[in-house]
């Protein structure tokens, strides 16, 4: 079939069941936008900055479990997506960036084309699993099929395809290809047998669930294993929601609290699923794990990378957990008084941690309790980097997978607002609430216009402490003075109203809950400015790393 390069892209997206893309048109990708105009079933959401477009695609992917797609033109626009793609790479989120290029004959020659970048494709390599250039129209469908396959092969990761603008405009023969078959990595039966046998013999097993559980849709299998073992389930930050927080075996995301560390050190076997044991989750790899570690991960490279595994299981978390659950049901489990009383142990541990946090930082705990009372159970919480969000990432109860969206690995300021727009576009049936600081919000505050244009009613809570509060405290502790940490801010309520959205000012945490409830009920875009500081000391309840940022 004869078509332009732009049409080959759009028809390929349609063939891969893409129904929404985020981006900004530019002089070099207009043929792609022309093709979008003629394609029913794909909605385009225009961003105000390419970084915002790629963050929206990431938020869409995390909230929906589908692939997020962003479009950019060449040069500065393509490079604007790199921070967002780096965030997606770090947190294993499947985002496809399609960027245009200067005319094919000029690439690498530095002749002075508009938007020319000396080696644009290489810029993508550091933040994607796979990146390629289409050199002809008939290559586009095959390259996009490979791009989709690469995104979902093992650990999800972003990819990029660049297409010279003259290829976008050229008409030639092209065959649109069906998606490659989805394949889950098979799990070695012997390693599953060993894992199940070790867990069956454990006296005090414990489970640590990471984001891989959510990515694979493994929550049901996780619950089966936990209930069979009567094992406490801790989660990483990206694993929040893998097991509903009100399940009796749910122990929260509090691994770094000294009481939790003591508890874990007293266990004899840990089953770690879909977690990489990163620096911040392990207090710089000083966290003491049980003597026996069973590590399940879809990425072979993660086994033994940071902690040696007694048993390494390479494969999809859902497949592995379901197989282990089946095996456990046919095995006799070790039993003792401690095993029978795990639920009461967990309850006591959670009460101890909350009491300690409340004693040391009542405002931090009050914030968490206020938000939990005011947010509907199904709310998607999207965080930026702010002290208030640091408390919530550890203590805020969440009840479903994909309701916690956090730029954890890259720790990227400016993520919250655009990612929330993407999440709301993916899940219009869910309330979406952003937790942002004043500094981070201003990185991408212009994207409020996108929420207005496309009627995406999100609630944005801005905690205004007049600066980069985390850095202010770090400078004070390290050097006894600060520089560049204090900010002059706009009137956020007036700014919100200038965008045509509701603006509310809150000066105490006592007021916050009612305002948040009303904002969600209104089904209107709302910005809530909170002029109440959550002290940095709140991030240091008993361990300097519990709740802190890197």
Image (cartoon, rainbow, N blue to C red):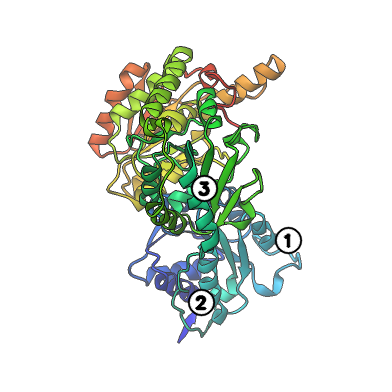
Q: Nearer the viewer, residue 221 or 414?
A: 221
Of labels 1 and 2, earlier in sequence is 1
* Residue in the picture at 48% in, 76% down: 8
The alpha-carbon separation of the residues under discs 1 and 2 comes to 26 Å
User: Which residue is tagged 3?
Assistant: 198
| Residue 156 visible here | no
**SS class of the residue under badge 1?**
loop
| Residue 280 visible here | yes
**SS class of the residue under badge 2?**
helix
Image mark for residue 141: 2
Q: Nearer the viewer, mark 3 or mark 1?
A: 3
The quadrant the N terminus occupies is bottom left
Crowd around label 3: few <14 · some 14–19 · many ≥20 (10 Å): many
The alpha-carbon separation of the residues under discs 3 and 1 comes to 55 Å
User: Which residue is tagged 1?
Assistant: 118
Vertically, is 510 above or below 311? above
Q: Nearer the viewer, residue 309 or 40?
A: 309
Outermost residue to the left = 521
Of labels 3 and 2, earlier in sequence is 2
Q: Position of residue 540 (x, y in %)?
A: 55, 20
Judge from the rendering whether residue 119 lies leftward or rightward of residue 182; answer left or right.
right
Vertically, is 223 above or below 539? below
Q: Position of residue 210 (x, y in %)?
A: 49, 44
**SS class of the residue under badge 3?**
helix
* Residue in the picture at 52% in, 34% down: 267
The quadrant the C terminus occupies is top right
Vertically, is 25 above or below 293? below
Image mark for residue 196: none
Crowd around label 2: few <14 · some 14–19 · many ≥20 (10 Å): many
Vertically, is 9 above or below 475? below
Of labels 3 and 1, earlier in sequence is 1
């Amino acid at each position: 079939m004869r078509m332009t390069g732009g049409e080959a892209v759009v028809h390929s997206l349609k063939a891969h069941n893409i129904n929404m893309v985020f981006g900004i048109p530019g002089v070099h990708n207009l043929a792609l936008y022309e093709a979008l105009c003629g394609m029913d079933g794909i909605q385009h959401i225009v961003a105000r900055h390419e970084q915002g477009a790629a963050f929206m695609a990431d938020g869409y992917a995390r909230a929906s479990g589908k692939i997020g797609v962003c479009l950019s033109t060449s040069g500065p626009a393509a490079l604007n997506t790199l921070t967002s793609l780096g965030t997606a790479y770090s947190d294993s989120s499947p985002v496809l960036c399609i960027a245009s290029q200067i005319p094919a004959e000029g690439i690498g020659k530095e002749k002075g084309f508009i938007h020319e970048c000396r080696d644009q494709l290489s810029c993508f390599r550091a933040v994607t699993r796979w990146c390629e250039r289409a050199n002809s129209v008939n290559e586009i469908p095959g390259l996009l099929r490979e791009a989709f396959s690469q995104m979902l092969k093992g650990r999800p990761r972003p990819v990029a395809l660049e297409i010279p603008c003259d290829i976008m405009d050229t008409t030639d023969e092209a065959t649109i290809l069906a998606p490659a078959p989805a394949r889950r990595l098979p799990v070695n039966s012997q390693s599953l047998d060993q894992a199940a046998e070790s867990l069956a013999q454990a006296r005090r097993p414990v489970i640590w669930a990471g984001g891989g559980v959510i990515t694979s849709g493994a929550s049901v299998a996780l619950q089966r294993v936990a209930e069979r073992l009567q094992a406490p389930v801790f989660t990483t930050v990206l694993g929040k929601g893998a097991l509903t927080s009100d399940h009796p075996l749910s122990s929260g995301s509090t691994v770094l609290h000294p009481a939790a560390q003591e508890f874990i050190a007293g266990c004899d076997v840990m089953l770690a699923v879909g977690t990489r044991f990163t620096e911040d989750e392990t207090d710089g790899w000083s966290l003491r794990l049980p003597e026996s570690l069973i590590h399940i991960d879809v990425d072979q490279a993660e086994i033994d990378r940071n902690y040696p595994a007694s048993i390494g299981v390479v494969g999809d978390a859902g497949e592995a957990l379901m197989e282990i659950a089946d095996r456990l049901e046919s095995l006799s489990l070790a039993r003792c008084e401690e095993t029978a009383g795990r639920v009461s142990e967990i309850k006591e541990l959670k009460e101890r941690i909350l009491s300690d946090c409340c004693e040391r930082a009542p405002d931090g705990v009050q914030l968490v309790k206020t938000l939990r009372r005011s947010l509907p159970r199904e709310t998607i919480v999207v965080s930026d980097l702010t002290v208030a969000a640091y408390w919530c990432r550890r203590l805020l109860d969440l009840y479903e997978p994909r309701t916690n969206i956090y730029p954890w690995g890259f720790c990227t300021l400016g993520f919250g607002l655009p990612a929330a727009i993407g999440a709301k576009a993916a899940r219009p049936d869910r309330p979406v609430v952003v937790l942002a600081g004043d500094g981070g919000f201003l990185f991408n505050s212009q994207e409020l216009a996108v929420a207005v244009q496309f009627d995406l009613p999100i609630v944005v809570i801005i905690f205004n402490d007049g600066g980069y509060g985390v850095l202010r405290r770090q400078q004070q502790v390290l050097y006894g003075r600060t520089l560049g940490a204090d900010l002059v801010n706009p009137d956020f309520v007036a700014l919100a109203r200038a965008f045509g959205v509701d603006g509310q000012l809150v000066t105490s945490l006592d007021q916050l809950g009612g305002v948040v409830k009303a904002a969600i009920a209104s089904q209107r875009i709302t910005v809530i400015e909170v002029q109440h500081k959550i002290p940095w000391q709140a991030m240091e309840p008993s361990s300097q790393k519990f709740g802190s940022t890197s």
